Image (spheres, helix red, strand yellow):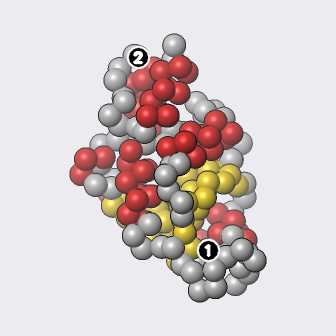
């Protein structure tokens, strides 16, 4: 497995991939719990042009996540295109972290995890359940609420709340 020169040998590195459009307190919860397991976590923003038009650009999402995680010194925020397992391998990570809220999440994530295992048997997937506080929060619901002027400040980190307010002004 390829490792970056700046990486501590035998450190446990994981990649937390997603679109994060926008980054929520549920995502933040998964980050915090993953840091209890791994030495380093790479929050990887998927920059896939095939998906529907995002609310925030990739660069905006990177900036918002970095601002939301500014006090997390063991977190790196990066974007990627292509296969998640190839990105993980290039970053020296042996684990993908996926957050789950409901059974419907599990069904889709399980299919993806099984395909990732076929493509890269050396990269594992770990599922972390969302805490009960955040189980009902999804990025698409947040965008709908914010779009109609609803309050979302208790559901997202402060930098994201400000950006949503500005976006829907």
Nearer to me, 163 or 16: 163
Q: Can you say whether 121 is above or below 53 in the image?
A: below
Residue shown at 44% from the left, 66% from the top: 35
Q: Disc 1 marks which residue?
A: 93
**Mark 1 or mark 2, which is nearer to you?**
1
Nearer to me, 123 or 109: 123
Q: Is residue 39 visible?
A: yes
**Mark 2 residue element:** loop
**Picture coordinates of residue 149, whole percent (x, y):** 40, 16
**Picture coordinates of residue 168, whole percent (x, y):** 51, 18
Q: Quadrant of the N terminus?
A: bottom right
Badge number at residue 3: none
Local packing at callout 2 (Cα closer than 10 Å; few below 14, some 14-19, many 20+) is few
Badge number at residue 148: 2
**Residue extending furthest left?**
132
**Picture coordinates of residue 148, whole percent (x, y):** 41, 16
**Picture coordinates of residue 38, whole percent (x, y):** 48, 73
Residue shown at 44% from the left, 58% from the top: 31
Q: Where, by quadrant of the figure, is residue 121 drawn?
A: bottom right
């Amino acid at each position: 497995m390829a490792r970056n020169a700046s990486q501590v040998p035998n450190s446990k590195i994981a990649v937390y991939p997603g679109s994060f459009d926008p980054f929520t307190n549920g995502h933040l919860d998964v980050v915090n719990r993953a840091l209890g397991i791994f030495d380093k976590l790479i929050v990887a923003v998927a920059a896939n042009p095939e998906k529907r038009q995002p609310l925030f650009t990739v660069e905006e999402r990177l900036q918002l996540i970095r601002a939301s995680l500014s006090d997390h010194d063991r977190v790196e925020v990066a974007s990627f295109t292509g296969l998640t397992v190839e990105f993980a391998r290039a970053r020296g990570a042996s684990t993908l972290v996926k957050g789950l809220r409901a059974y419907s999440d599990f069904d889709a994530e399980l299919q993806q995890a099984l395909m990732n295992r076929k493509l890269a048997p050396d990269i594992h997937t770990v599922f972390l359940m969302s805490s009960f506080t955040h189980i009902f929060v999804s990025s698409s619901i947040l965008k709908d609420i914010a779009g109609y002027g609803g309050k979302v400040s208790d559901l997202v980190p402060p930098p994201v709340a400000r950006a949503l307010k500005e976006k829907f002004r």
